[in-house]
Image: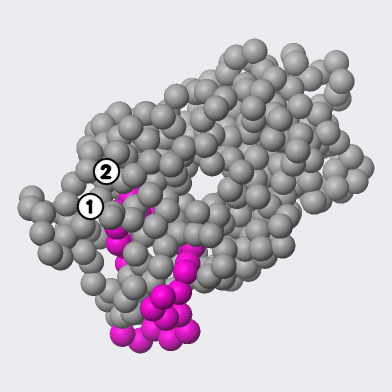
Amino acid sequence: MVRKMSVPPMELVDYEGPGTQMCAVMDAIGEISVRRALIPEPKDGEVRVKVKWVGICGSDVEVFRGAREPEFISYPTRLGHEVAGVIDKIGPNVIGVKEGDHVALRYVWGAFAEYVCCTPFSLKVLPKDLPLIEGSLIEVLPGIIHAAELGDISPNKNVLITGQGVSGLVMTQVVNMFSPRNLVVTDLFDEKLALARKYGATHTYKLPNEHANTMDIVGADFPDGFDVVIPCLLEGAGMVDAINAAAQNGRIVMYGCIGTCHKPVDFFKVHKKRLDILSTEPKRDIDNRRYFDEGLRLVLDGLVNTEEMITHVVPLAEVARAFQLRNEHKGDTIHVMIDCEVK
């Protein structure tokens, strides 16, 4: 069975002192607080990571907004999975990685804290000359590279990416390297579309509002729709728009739109258009590791920029303010980073 994202256990306490750490807890919808917890000890086969940077992902925002169904999440909970830090302790029966290694984490949720423990499977060792702040977003690259490969993109195909948030902007950089005929992106904000053009988008379209139908905006230029549609939006209703935008015999790769869809889905349209709809998380652990390696290489080779979209840096003690910032739908707020190193 493929490994899934997990929340490492953390024992909350009601006092501050030696052996305790600061962590963030999502108490209820729209409410996140700073609490104290025991600093965890690595178990057999685990390492402990002193967390430095954690980005606020769109999935964190969905939980903050209460947009995930109860079978997916319950409150209180812990968030944070775009992580970079330093290994500070090694548990028994761990070889290869060592104390002092700089690492990015994947498949670890609940990392808005000073320390977390995990297995080496969740680690990717980073070169020490790569700034850690640039390493945290390597976590998104396995799913993004896999999505681009599933799209079967080639120079005779038109590709649409809906949404240019953090993951959408990274997706645009990666898909550009697959050399599509046209790389079309949409978003609500000029600032994000400007970055998309820099990252290789051939056509950018500003939507008038979040409920706009993409084909109403782009249809004059692309009346037949798109061979590959990759939604990078949060809300599941974006899949209805993706189905409408897909060309005959097209393919939709669901990097985003994995939230609940409250709109009716016309499955006859899926049948009539002969569409393929694919999910993006690697289905085998070995593939997850391979894409982790490839993602790091793209960053180290200067082909994917994970730093330019960072617009705000907020200390862990002010995590509530950081979530309020990230929850605001504005062009000048793209990626909000939490600094988890408590001075």
Residue 12 can be seen in this image: yes
Task: Examine the structure image and report whether residue 95 is included in the region drawn in magenta.
Answer: yes
Residue at image mark 2:
317
- The residue shown at (59%, 40%) is 309
Dominant SS in magenta: loop
Quarter of the view holding residue 331: top right
Which percent across, then down, holds residue 150? 72, 51
Left/right of residue 236 with respect to residue 23 in the rendered view: right
Amino acid type, callout 2: Ala
- The residue shown at (50%, 23%) is 329
Q: Which stretch is magenta?
A: 92-117
Q: Earlier in the sequence, mark 2 or mark 1?
A: 1
Left/right of residue 220 with respect to residue 168 in the rendered view: right
Q: Residues within 10 Å of mark 1 (few under 14, many from 20)?
A: many
Q: Residues within 10 Å of mark 2 (few under 14, many from 20)?
A: many
State yes or no: discs 2 and 1 in contact (Cβ < 8 Å): yes
- The residue shown at (48%, 34%) is 259
Task: Examine the structure image and report whether residue 148 is included in the region drawn in magenta.
Answer: no
Which percent across, then down, holds residue 113? 30, 54
The foreground one among 316 and 91 is 316
